[in-house]
Image: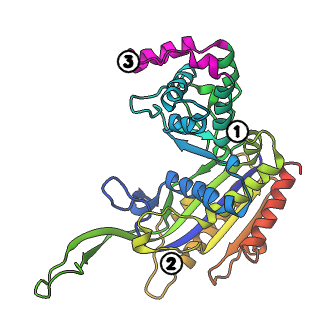
Amino acid sequence: MNLLEIHILQNVAPACLNRDDTGSPKDALFGGVRRARLSSQSQKRAVRLFFREILVPRGLFSREDLALRTKRLVEELVRRLTGLERDSTQVEAVVKAVLGGAGLGVAETGLTEYLLFLGEREISRLATLIEEHWETLKALSPLEEGDRKSRKKTAKAQVPKEIKEAMQGIFDGGRAVDLALFGRMLADRPEWNVDAASQVAHAISTHKVDREFDFYTAVDDLNPAEETGAGMMGDVEFVSACFYRYADLNLDLLFENLGQDRELAVKAARAFVEAFVKTLPSGKQNTFAAHNPPDFVAVRLSQADTPRNLANAFVPPVYVRPGEDLVAESIKRLEAYWERLDNAYGHPEGEKVFVLPVKDFELDYLAPHVRGNLEALLIQIESAVKECLGG
């Protein structure tokens, strides 16, 4: 397996980047103490938004190279198909019938039963299929009678066999980069599932944390002079933490998920590294502006049998005395554990390591792998991935 692994140490100023259902910063017990935590899902969404908002305008990808996560598929297809003397109500009835025939139920609200993750090309192909068979599909009943389950069953029976067969080739991932990276699971249509090429760990702080509270007040600008009280008050929880962040990427599976498009797979791997390094979840950033880039990045490319998450370097939480550097101590701990694992289990076959230390800190074991800056690191990773994929 050609495997790419990313290890990041990132010290974040007071923030509430990822909240739980009570509005508190997410946390976890690890090594017997409370740690700050960033969920896997929140980090993956930040990567997806970076692709769409930064890399598409830059020209690295087109919109068609990405996917949409939505329950509003009916609404999107109606938008694409309405016109040419077609009534939107009629189009909506046809779209619902087609989706029901495909086993994708639609609720009374017009939303799909599941939050679907579909490539832009898959949605376009589905719209084209409906366009091509419009007259046949228009003759189908709107299926307004009965409950949702019975309508879905009736739709499956009514949609012609040739259209059902044509739909089998539509949901292949559409060579969407983010879909290839993060995968798709549809309980009712497992043949349309896509195994994720990447895995992202929940980030945890290298040290023990305690939540703190910011009590805030807001003054009403139009208050008369004799009224001195606040117009609003409240409090918000926050933490400050040095996070260990980890992700891995199966390059062979990425290549397969992208239809064996080597050029797109190489671009996707480089983009994933860049996006993971540059992004964080965005919770309450207007309040805290905790835009702190990583202090340490290490990427290992190898033909490893299994990945190596290095979180256990921090089972005994990092503790620093006044005047000592939490980030430097965390880097030291990570480097020492990396070396111990290499000594215990050996170096993965074909290993190439790329290290970007920002902190003014003397590396030891990883010193030979240091690169000058992020752009140099990305260029060398891109070249190494191309070589792995036979380019």
Above or below, comparing residue 226 to residue 169 in the picture: below
Q: Label 1 belongs to which residue?
A: 174
In-front residue for pair 40/326? 40
Q: Nearer the viewer, mark 2 or mark 1?
A: 1
Residue 274, located in which quarter of the rendered image? bottom right
Report the amino acid beneath label 1.
Gly
Q: Which region of the structure is painted magenta? A: 133-161
Among numbered discs 2 and 3, the one appearing first in the sequence: 3
Above or below, comparing residue 96 to residue 383 in the picture: above
Q: Label 3 belongs to which residue?
A: 147
Element carrying mark 3: loop
- In the image, 368: left or right of 315? right
Residue furthest to the front in view is 85
- In the image, 345: left or right of 118? right
Q: Label 2 belongs to which residue?
A: 326
Q: Nearer the viewer, mark 1 or mark 3?
A: 3
How far apart marks 2 and 3 lie (CA) works out to 59 Å
Asked whether the beta carbons under mark 2 and mark 3 sit within 8 Å of each other, the answer is no
Q: Is residue 107 visible?
A: yes
Percent from the top left, x then y, of residue 106?
Answer: 46, 28
In-front residue for pair 92/219? 92
Does the magenta run of residues contain 155? yes
Report the amino acid beneath label 2.
Leu
Which residue is depicted at the point 58% across and 52% down?
200
Above or below, comparing residue 82 to residue 206 in the picture: above
How far apart marks 1 and 3 lie (CA) works out to 32 Å
Report the amino acid beneath label 3.
Asp
Which residue is depicted at the point 41% across and 21% down?
148
Among numbered discs 2 and 1, the one appearing first in the sequence: 1
How far apart marks 2 and 1 lie (CA) works out to 45 Å
